[in-house]
Image (cartoon, rainbow, N blue to C red):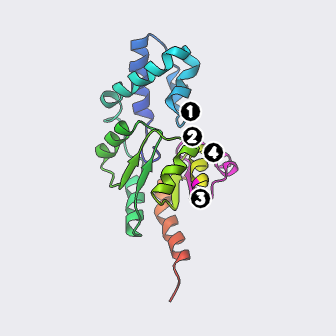
Amino acid sequence: MTLIDTVPGFRDVLLALGAELEVEFPVEEMTKKLGPPLDLLLEPYLAAEAIGPAGDRFRALYPDYAIRSVPALPGAHEAIAAVRRHGGRVVVVTGKYAANAQLHVDHVGFDIDHLEGWVWGIGKAEVLVREGAQIYVGDHIHDVEGALAAGALSVSVLTGGCTAEELLEAGTHVVLNDLGEFPAWLDDFVGQRTPQL
């Protein structure tokens, strides 16, 4: 989720899962690769038949280990407020398991209109189209894919591990350093689209 710093929570759940499974996951390395579905992250370290059950257990452990330690990213509340100020809706479309994503939303107090979980990459396009999204803010090249497939403007922030070069190569329209830059960008964007009297 582009709005929160998931690293501490992911790390804590992964450590708990590893202890249960007696598997020493390379936690620091894995936290640098956040973005893809959990199954893909677990794949190199578990037998194929163990990945599904391990993913289920990860999601079950998640509420106890990953919610309280995960903060909103700087600028997240302000970015949401900027959308509201311009009369927009805030739709969160994430690869996270929806129930756990909702726990994060509730914990940090995000004012959102809709949350859709367990969708990834181009799969996000269906939700974005259905919800009428005109702008999609993400932090991964696969967020860019989803935005472009939906015909939405892709805005990328550099807080998710992808470089500006990778995001631009994927086709994003805008690269911002972080969510703190989004309100001013949105003000300018809306101002350029509003006819001057």
Q: Earlier in the sequence, mark 4 or mark 1?
A: 1
Quote the CA–CA distance across marks 2 and 4. 7 Å
Please provide the residue range marked out in magenta.
150-174
Q: Are marks 4 and 1 in contact (CB under 8 Å)?
A: no
Give the vertical position of 136 relative to 163 (above or below): below
Q: Nearer the viewer, residue 162 or 89?
A: 89
Residue 103 coordinates in the image, percent (x, y): 31, 40
In the picture, the disc for residue 161 is 2
Binning the other alpha carbons within 10 Å of mark 1 as few (below 14), some (14 to 19) or many (20 upward) gives few
Task: Tell me, yes or no, if residue 176 can be seen here.
Answer: no
Q: Quadrant of residue 101?
A: top left
Q: Earlier in the sequence, mark 1 or mark 2?
A: 1
Q: Are marks 2 and 4 in contact (CB under 8 Å)?
A: no
Q: Nearer the viewer, mark 3 or mark 2?
A: 3
Q: Count the marks: how many? A: 4
Q: Are marks 1 and 2 in contact (CB under 8 Å)?
A: yes
In the picture, the disc for residue 6 is none
Residue pointed to by mark 3: 151
Task: Tell me, yes or no, if residue 49 can be seen here.
Answer: yes
Quote the CA–CA distance across marks 3 and 1. 27 Å
Q: Amino acid at mark 2?
A: Gly
Q: Nearer the viewer, residue 112 or 124?
A: 124
Residue beneath the point at 44% across and 27% down: 11
Residue beneath the point at 41% across and 70% down: 86
Q: Earlier in the sequence, mark 3 or mark 2?
A: 3
Image side of residue 80 versus residue 68, left or right: right
Q: Are marks 3 and 1 in contact (CB under 8 Å)?
A: no
Q: Amino acid at mark 1?
A: Lys
Q: Earlier in the sequence, mark 3 or mark 1?
A: 1
Residue 123 coordinates in the image, percent (x, y): 54, 44
Residue pointed to by mark 1: 33
Quote the CA–CA distance across marks 4 and 1. 12 Å
